[in-house]
Amino acid sequence: MKRIAILISGGGSNMLALVRSMTGDHPGRPVLVASNDPAAGGLARATALGIATAAVDHHVFHGDRAGFEAELLAHIEAARPDILCLAGFMRILTPQFVARFEGRMLNIHPSLLPKYPGLRTHQRAIEAGDHEAGCTVHEVTAELDGGPILGQARVPILPADDAGTLAARVLEQEHRLYPAVLRRFAAGGRIRLDLTSKPAF
């Protein structure tokens, strides 16, 4: 059974989707939910589900990224995870941190990578006149949002969409895609998974 640690920064909806999927014959189990924000709503949700939590406030470190990561790493290593999942974790990790989990750290990103790494993904897709958007689960490497793609889910961009409506529809697919990819990954699979939602009209 693989031990799964999850890093979050906010409400933790993707974390919840992952945790709720890890039952029955799933090859993984959650052992830690950690955040860079002690007030992150996802921490209370994880605690309510009986999962150990940790918080390391990045503001305390005033730009000392190495110090922040050292404290975060202490909590993670104490949980002895086999796989580390970033689920809305809004801190860029150093190459040194990433190297410690090479080949066993996943992230979900709200665009169809390699399009639109970074922020404002939904608005950028709309402004570019794209006909579809979506999300990507990938292995984490030192290149921002640049690791090997393990799965994608696509949604149509509708004529009336703004960034908010598109984000909400993509988020629904994130909650389908991430658990499906994690299940495969924890079982040793690296085959890419692609999901497509049905048009809403």
Image: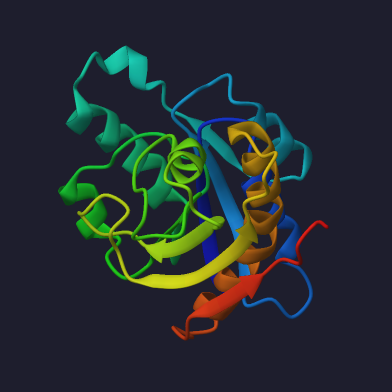
Which residue lies at the image location 62% right of the left edge and 51% below the top edge? 157
Residue 17 sits above or below residue 61 on the image? below
Q: Nearer the viewer, residue 119 or 179?
A: 119
Residue 198 location, quadrant: bottom right
Residue 127 sits above or below residue 20 on the image? above
166 left or right of 134? right
Spot occupied by residue 141 in the image (x, y as percentages of width and height): 25, 59
Which residue lies at the image location 49% right of the left edge and 36% below the top edge? 123
86 left or right of 160? left
Spot occupied by residue 35 in the image (x, y as percentages of width and height): 49, 33
Residue 201 sits above or below residue 120 on the image? below
Q: Residue furthest right?
A: 201
Which quadrant holds the C terminus?
bottom right
Spot occupied by residue 174 in the image (x, y as percentages of width and height): 62, 55
Residue 52 location, quadrant: top right
Spot occupied by residue 162 in the image (x, y as percentages of width and height): 62, 34
Which residue lies at the image location 24% right of the left edge and 13% below the top edge? 62
Q: How many marks?
A: 0
Which quadrant holds the N terminus?
bottom right
Picture colour scheme: rainbow
Residue 151 can be seen, yes or no: yes
58 left or right of 17? left
63 left or right of 113? left
Which residue lies at the image location 26% right of the left edge and 49% below the top edge? 144
Residue 81 can be seen, yes or no: no
